[in-house]
Amino acid sequence: MVAAAKWGIRRATIDLEMPRLATFSSRVDSTRKSVARHWEDEVRLFVTGLPLAVLPQCTFIRTQNGSQPMTSDHLSALILANIEMAAEVNHVLAIAEKVLDHVPEHALTSIDPSELERNLVFLGLIGLQDSSKERFEIPR
């Protein structure tokens, strides 16, 4: 929230410009959460969660040149980045999206989220630092 505020991103603005249509949580292990929003005349699904739960669902990656097919080199680099970030912050989340052009808005609440959370476009990794929690190291 602090990082978003520094960039001028406010929850109220997001809710106004991108109305929330449905929210889904992974029913089995709570490793992913998805929200469907109406944005730019499209229904988009945004998925956040543990990188190792989100990355396998991504078949594309957003780059400076647009969306590109996710390669094994991309995946290896992202897994390494996740490990490196996890050493520095409390939590690492992956974020991905998908345009739901085939799903009518009224049907969103009746669809199994795992059906929607496939063939995602990977957007990035986010490191979260909670300064109120002390970091601890496991004794060796």
Image (cartoon, rainbow, N blue to C red):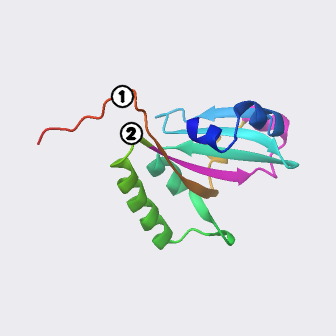
In the structure shown, which secondary structural element does the residue marked by tag 2 occupy?
loop
- Give the vertical position of 60 relative to 101 (above or below): below
Q: Are the residues tagged 1 and 2 within 8 Å (C-beta)? A: yes
**Amino acid of disc 2:** Asn
Label placed on residue 119: none
In the shown orientation, is residue 134 left or right of residue 81? left
Q: What residue do we see at 88% from left, 49% from top? A: 41
| Residue 112 can be seen in this image | no
Q: What residue do we see at 84% from left, 34% from top? A: 106
**Amino acid of disc 1:** Lys
In the shown orientation, is residue 79 left or right of residue 22? left
Label placed on residue 133: 1
In the shown orientation, is residue 4 left or right of residue 87? right
| Residue 25 can be seen in this image | yes
Residue 120 drawn at (x, y percent): 63, 56
Residue 68 drawn at (x, y percent): 64, 71
Mark 2 neighbour density, 10 Å: few (under 14) some (14–19) many (20 or more): some
The residue singled out by tag 2 in the image is 90
Name, please, the residue furthest toward the top: 132
- Give the vertical position of 80 relative to 43 (above or below): below
Segment colored magenta: 92-110
**Which corner quadrant of the image does residue 76 belong to?**
bottom left
Which of these two is toward me, 131 or 66? Answer: 131
Tell me how far mark 1 sits from mark 2, CA to CA. 9 Å
Q: Quadrant of the N terminus?
A: top right
**Which corner quadrant of the image does residue 17 belong to?**
top right
